[in-house]
């Protein structure tokens, strides 16, 4: 495998958060400091120009993974290779360059824009950082950006509250694009939007991707949306990737029992695409004290002794289709 | 069983009155599940609140009637409405964590709804009530109810909290359940569990459900009938399979074209252009006109009413008049 095919490669990435208890809590409740294993050993490759969908239920660590990849969180363990280079030790200038090429769009368009700043203020930050010093040039670029994301030039002096949710998300895109990135982490970019607006944003995403040859890591919990936008999909459960495959292969022939249950739960307006529902018992275990062995064994209908003892390694069952499950070893 | 006729609910604001619900007519039979579908701000939740007369001031119901089992809720005395709330018509809200009281034990909160409505209908002992609560908790699928009874809401997961809310709603064996986006805050796998629970309650107890959701896919799987709302009005109504297979109103059609579907080949979505209109200053003309791809000059000229097109289907569009 040549490393130039990949824009980003992650090996054994872990992000643990330590939950510190105050002295008083420790004395009163005898609770100790504990570790939340939000991301617990993830291997992932993101190819140049593709959209990799990352799905999983809430709390499975998908947003943490997205942020750790961008070093918004310092990884606990593991390697992040960007264009073949390990970014672990990058500081200062080098980090600035990385930030320029890797951007993020957040889920909540209400919380991710400063309410006291106009669009002009919001967009000039990345432009200045990129070195567009001439005010006239900056103004021109801002107008181009706004048009690119489907807003009007006169929106430049408006404040975030004057926009609807969909329009705010467009400002979020403009801000990310201002850096001329190659890679964008989209963290649930449409989950707070209404369906009719959601479709507009999804189309905008794919247009921008083609126009500017972008690579996306698309994080979402809505599987129909992920099916629609992704080239490949990675399924996450309790901090680990359990299955990765090309989108159509994954939806047609899911291998991991968790993926199967997850897909069967998708509601659909088309009768033909409804699957026989496999209702999973119980709830997702806590990532403070995850189950031993395979993290899914507590809810898996097909679990056997092996599953409780050791964690399955990821194997390639079909071309590009990787599964971490003892059934396929 | 429930018949809403020309309901209009209004909220005065500084910029003018907002008609959150306008000329809403709807009827629901025993044992039926009716879905109320629409985007945010279209008046779905206000409709539910109006049924229970829970619309918060300064909002008020300005016209219409809501008949429940032959009696008009809107003309009842407050004490009478209170007797119906929770007992005959119960409600499940969207966000369980804000609905459950964080400082009371979950089991006691379920018992409270029993206690409130048992006044005057023969005394029951605390122990009997507790037994009923335990069997309710079991029925809605809360595992080990004996220990769960004494836990607080924060010790429950989202799905379990929603089950507890459903148990509270079911405590008095209501004939009608109003569900306001009960699965929106949940993950798909948990959503599937809750929907299964609700349809079991519907078929075993014959409880009618008025189910509010923004998710057309959930509505199409779970409901028997749907009403599609846009800007405070019902634009289309009918048996769910027919509406989904053959939408009549351009808005319903647009909605169906903008949801990503799990079909091959994947094609580009065709979103509805523009944004949902401002509810202030809406006229009685079609409010979808500015986003509609089949608009005609006539649309802006005269009001449109909901017409019966046969087969139980109704649509509010000039094309069908």
Image (cartoon, coloured by chain):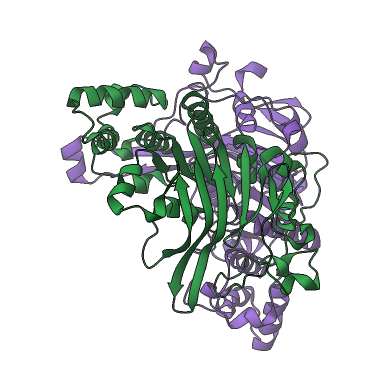
Chain colours: A purple, B green
B225 up-or-down from A275: above or below: below
- Quarter placement of the C terminus of chain B: bottom right
**Left or right relative to B310: residue B199:** left
A287 up-or-down from B261: above or below: above
Given residues A96 and A292, the one toward you in this image is A292
Where residue A63 appears, as percent x and y from the top left, is 53, 48
Residue B52 in view here: no
Where residue B45 appears, as percent x and y from the top left, is 48, 53
B34 up-or-down from A74: above or below: above
Residue drawn at (16%, 39%), measured in percent from left and top?
A27
**Left or right relative to B159: residue A265:** right
Residue drawn at (37%, 61%), measured in percent from left and top?
B56
Where residue B143 appears, as percent x and y from the top left, is 38, 23
A243 up-or-down from A63: above or below: above
Given residues A296 and A274, the one toward you in this image is A274
Given the current orientation, which residue lies at the most extreme right position? B265
Where residue B201 appears, as percent x and y from the top left, is 48, 28
Residue drawn at (37%, 45%), measured in percent from left and top?
B97
**Left or right relative to B122: residue A232:** right
Given residues A9 and B208, the one toward you in this image is B208
């Amino acid at each position: 495998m040549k490393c130039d095919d990949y824009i980003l490669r992650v090996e054994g990435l872990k992000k643990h958060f330590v939950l510190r208890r105050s002295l008083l809590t420790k004395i009163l409740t005898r609770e100790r400091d504990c570790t939340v294993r939000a991301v617990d050993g993830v291997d992932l490759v993101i190819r140049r120009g593709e959209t990799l969908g990352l799905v999983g239920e809430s709390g499975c660590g998908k947003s943490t993974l997205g942020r750790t990849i961008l070093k918004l969180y310092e990884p606990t363990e593991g390697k992040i290779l960007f264009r073949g280079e390990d970014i672990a030790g990058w500081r200062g200038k080098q980090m600035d360059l990385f930030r320029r090429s890797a951007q993020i769009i957040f889920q909540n368009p209400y919380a991710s824009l400063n309410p006291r700043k106009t669009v002009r203020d919001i967009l000039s930050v990345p432009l200045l950082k990129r070195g567009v010093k001439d005010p006239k040039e900056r103004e021109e670029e801002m107008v181009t950006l706004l048009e690119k994301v489907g807003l009007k030039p006169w929106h430049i002096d408006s404040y975030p509250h004057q926009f609807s949710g969909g329009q705010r998300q467009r400002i979020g895109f403009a801000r990310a694009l201002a850096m001329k990135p190659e890679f964008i982490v989209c963290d649930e970019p449409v989950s707070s939007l209404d369906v009719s607006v959601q479709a507009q944003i999804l189309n905008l995403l794919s247009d921008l991707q083609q126009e500017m040859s972008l690579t996306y890591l698309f994080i979402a919990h809505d599987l129909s949306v992920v099916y629609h936008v992704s080239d490949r999909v990675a399924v996450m459960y309790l901090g680990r990737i359990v299955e990765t495959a090309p989108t159509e292969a994954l939806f047609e022939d899911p291998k991991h029992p968790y993926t199967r249950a997850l897909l069967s739960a998708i509601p659909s307006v088309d009768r033909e695409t409804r699957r026989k529902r496999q209702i999973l018992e119980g709830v997702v275990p806590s990532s403070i004290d995850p189950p031993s062995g395979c993290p899914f064994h507590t809810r898996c209908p097909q679990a056997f002794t092996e599953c409780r003892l050791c964690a399955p390694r990821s194997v390639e069952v079909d071309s590009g289709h990787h599964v971490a499950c003892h059934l396929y070893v | 069983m429930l018949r809403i006729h020309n309901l209009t609910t209004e909220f005065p604001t500084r910029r003018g009155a907002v008609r959150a619900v306008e000329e809403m007519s709807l009827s629901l039979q025993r044992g039926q599940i009716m879905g109320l579908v629409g985007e945010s701000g279209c008046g779905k939740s206000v409709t539910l609140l109006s049924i229970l007369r829970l619309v918060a001031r300064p909002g008020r119901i300005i016209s219409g009637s809501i008949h429940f089992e032959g009696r008009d809720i809107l003309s009842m005395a407050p004490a009478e409405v209170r007797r119906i709330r929770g007992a005959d018509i119960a409600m499940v809200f969207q966000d369980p964590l804000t609905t459950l009281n964080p400082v009371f034990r979950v089991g006691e909160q379920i018992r409270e709804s029993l206690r409130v409505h048992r006044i005057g209908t023969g005394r029951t002992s605390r122990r009997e009530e507790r037994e009923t609560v335990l069997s309710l908790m079991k029925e809605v699928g809360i595992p080990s109810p004996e220990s769960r009874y004494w836990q607080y809401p924060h010790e429950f997961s989202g799905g379990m909290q929603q089950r507890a809310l459903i148990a509270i709603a079911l405590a008095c064996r209501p004939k009608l359940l109003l569900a306001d986006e009960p699965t929106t805050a949940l993950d798909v796998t948990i959503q599937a569990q809750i929907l299964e629970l609700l349809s079991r309650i519907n078929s075993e107890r014959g409880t009618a459900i008025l189910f509010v959701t923004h998710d057309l896919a959930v509505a199409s799987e779970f409901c028997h009938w749907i009403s599609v709302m846009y800007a405070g009005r019902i634009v289309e109504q009918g048996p769910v399979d027919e509406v989904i297979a053959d939408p009549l109103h351009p808005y319903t059609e647009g909605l169906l074209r903008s949801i990503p579907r799990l079909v091959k080949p994947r094609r580009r979505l065709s979103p509805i252009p523009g944004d949902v209109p401002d509810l202030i200053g809406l006229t009685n003309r079609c409010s979808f006109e500015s986003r509609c791809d089949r608009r005609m000059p006539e649309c802006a000229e005269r009001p449109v009413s909901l017409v019966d097109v046969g087969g139980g289907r109704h649509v509010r569009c000039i094309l069908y008049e």
